[in-house]
Image: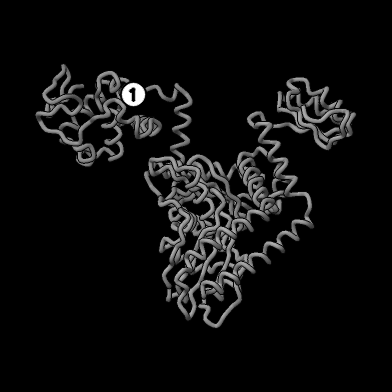
Amino acid sequence: MEGGSDRPAGLLLGIGAGGEPAGLIRAAAGAGASGVIVKAGGERALRDVSALGAERGVAVLALAADQDWTDLIGRLRALLAVRVGAGARQGAVLGRRHDLVSLANSLAGLVNGSVMIFTPGQELLAASRLGPGDDEMRRAAVLDQHGPAGYRARLVELGVYRRLWSGPEVVDVAAVPEVGAGRRLAAAVRAGSENLGSIWVAEGDEPLAKNAAALLADAATVAVGVLLGLDQEEVARRRLDEELFGRALLGDVDPQLAASHLAVDPGTPVTVLIADLSAQGTRPGAADLYRAKEEALRHLAGYRWRALATTGPSRVVLALVGPADRDGIRRAADGVGAAVAEAVGARPRTGIGLCVPHLGELPASRMEAELVVRALARRGEIRSACLEDVRGTANLLMLGEAVTADWRLQEGPVHRLRAHDLRRGTAYVQTLAAYLDAFGDTAAASRELNVHANTLRYRMGRIRELTGLDLGDPYERLNAAIQLFALGPNDLVAGHEGTPKTSSPSTNREGAPGLHTADHDPVTGAGS
């Protein structure tokens, strides 16, 4: 337990208090503390300690069972760093900008060009003095205090941002005359995996100095010291915002408190986007996810979208803040997909959630976006979509979950057929699925399975014999289709994973060549 009755404290942490927090609350009241944090227990226990706290004039806060005390202490300290000393913080920001302007002007004189220093979201922090040789895009950035959206889009197409954020080297950017931009050199300002911003050098009427790249790399190192030394509070704030946003997505935080801390009006609509990178078959690392998140935020900021962001396993989760029509949100989702692909070299499946009226409804938007991502995965599509685009697949996924959760819904011909496949090594479940997918078209189904049409007819006859399935009954047919969908594509071939793609009259498709059983295919000799 931290704190005690002999030392006044604002907040006591019930570390080691176990299941007896009553003594801690009494000690807090005696020390004049305003609140106590205890590990979340049962609902009744929390009611009892809350009542005791109210009686003693001490607020009782519950720490989530899955959260560590050390983690909490670090976040509290970061929160104090953010909240305390607003006047000093304002002075620090002014000092930072002054230092960066000095750095920009000094570097400009050395490289014989103009210099701009940007935040990760492409907001202009500092720039060297404008000169007669500055090109149109450089002037637009200074006037707008933001990287021009059209030029940024062109840089994405050229792969500039991927190179900028994936390594420490200085990136040489060729001129883009169609948008009025000359040659650039760019370097990321990075502290470990934390992207603090970037420095850009623009060539004017005269060529850049021969050692401009080396000078820029040195300046990026100096900028790290300036930004990191004066931006610790901002870094702490961003991390706290990300943690709070993550809990808001799960509905684990009071929406009013979340809205207040995240500076979001309680009545502002929000829409969740999930960019999932698991489609590539490998799980992206933390560095890739960080780059993907930062590039997505930079893209959205370039188009004036306010967004909250966090990362999860193989995914970036965003919330667009503010009202927008569906077409605008679709464009934003498409842009996020392109930006993430640029950052990590792989395009994500991007699910668009429901636009909800306030942060308190964020979990509903998240769940819909997750459902869309799952539907895209089931369809084998890598693109952005909302629920209307994949409604049929999404509904079947939910029906499949109901089937999987209740054994009574799994019983029947499909269940018996799969048991036969697992026992005998046949592939009748796969055959039935192909036949239903082809709407009973024997020629189409046999082409899909790469077998002779007579082989397919034989198998369908065996399926009726083995299970009693009556495909002439529309209800039985629909039930079988739903059960097959619930199995999933991997389980459709669980009976025989090594089924070859070709067959011949002398090849046993379910087994080894020439192997016959009592029940055999008259065309291929396939066992049943």
* Circle 1: residue type: Pro
Q: Residue at x 64, y 69 (%)?
A: 102
Task: Name the image quarter holding the N terminus.
Answer: top right
Q: Is residue 102 left or right of residue 299?
A: right
Q: Is residue 387 visible?
A: no
Q: Residue at x 26, y 26 (%)?
A: 496
Q: Residue at x 32, y 31 (%)?
A: 492
Task: Name the image quarter holding the C terminus.
Answer: top left
Q: Position of residue 466 (x, y in %)?
A: 26, 20
Q: Is residue 24 visible?
A: yes
Q: Position of residue 311 (x, y in %)?
A: 54, 44
Q: Quickly name the residue at label 1.
A: 413
Q: Position of residue 274 (x, y in %)?
A: 51, 47
Tell me if residue 232 comes above or below residue 517 in the rendering.
below
- Which one is nearer the viewer's eye here, 23 or 266? 23
Q: Kindly give the residue lying farthest to the left in the view shown.
A: 506
Secondary structure of residue under mark 1: helix
Q: Kindly give the residue lying farthest to the bottom in the view shown.
A: 132
